[in-house]
Amino acid sequence: MASIIIFSGVLVDSPIRFLGIQGNLAELGPLQGIFGTRNQLGVITLIAIVTFGTELRTRSVRRGVSIGSLVLAGLLLLLTRSPIAFGGLIIVVLAALALFGLRRVPAESKQFWQIGLLAATITVAAAAWAARTPIITALSASNELNKRLDLWRPMRILIPAHELEGWGWVGHWRQDVPPFQVFPNYFDRMPTSGMNAYLDVWFQLGLIGLFAFVGLVGLTFIRSWLLASRQRSFVYAWPALVLVVLLTTGLAESSMLVEFGWLTFVVCCVKAARELSWRKAFAATGPASLLQ
């Protein structure tokens, strides 16, 4: 990725159009790399920061390599100039601090602190929603929001036509499949997603798919968060913090539904299900254990 960006932005100082690279490195961004948009690259960079930070904390690689990787990832995040990625970074840092504190709370009082943290999160989320206008202005995200509103309005108009079952799953949007032909009028190029993972699922899979998706997301995040706060090894924090990245950026991007985003989400699901499963609980308290 870095070599392609340097080649396009500095060495030849020209875009590579078939890869979607604009070659803005000499102007210090915004960079989008081979992911097509600066926001997609920002999501990848956030996941990289969480990964490199976990490597540094667990000492799984040399300290100098971890610190260098974190510095490069942070620099790349700045060069994306993505307000979505900047907002996601703030939330991930707050989540990491909360998790860091929870891991040091005595086990007998951990449940109380978990409930308190949940209440505080809901309060902060409500306050952020009430102050959304100055927050959007501070992140310079007004233009990003206006683009998404232009896309979400026709989606909300079309959803009631197939509210329960949706219009059918296509993943990346295709211009040759109805009803996606109506959307290119709102962008210089055809949008490839609904730019909101939850609305995108509702649009393509209906309320049935949305409830199933939210249930899967909720169960996976709860399991991952409990594991991260209970287990001694910090490596268990990686799925929880990566899910924070995917779920928060999912409010403005649909990247978690396809390609790298979906793969990463499935990895987190599998990890959480393997380590904190009802099957293990049943095995520990079931008939076999009672006979022992």
Image: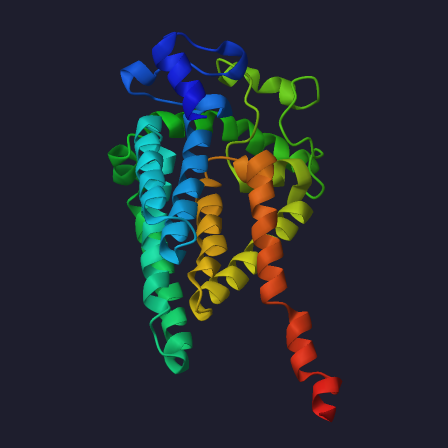
At 36% across and 79% down in the image, what residue appears?
A: 106
The answer to whether residue 123 is left or right of residue 17 is left
At 40% across and 70% down in the image, what residue appears?
A: 114
Viewport quadrant of the C terminus: bottom right
x and y percent of residue 32 in the render? 42, 23
- Is residue 289 or residue 115 the one in the foreground? 289
At 61% across and 40% down in the image, what residue appears?
A: 201
Query: Which of the 4 image quadrants contains residue 124?
Result: bottom left
Farthest bottom residue? 291
All told, the count of numbered labels is 0
x and y percent of residue 99 in the render? 37, 62
Query: Which of the 4 image quadrants contains residue 121?
Result: bottom left
Q: Can you see residue 163?
A: no
- Is residue 258 or residue 291 the one in the foreground? 291
Q: Can you see residue 6?
A: yes
At 56% across and 37% down in the image, what residue appears?
A: 260
In this figure, which colouring scheme has been used for the structure? Answer: rainbow
Q: Is residue 50 above or below residue 179?
A: below
The answer to whether residue 198 is left or right of residue 141 is right
Q: Is residue 240 above or below residue 139?
A: below
- Is residue 128 or residue 235 the one in the foreground? 235
x and y percent of residue 231 in the render? 47, 69
x and y percent of residue 26 in the render? 30, 14
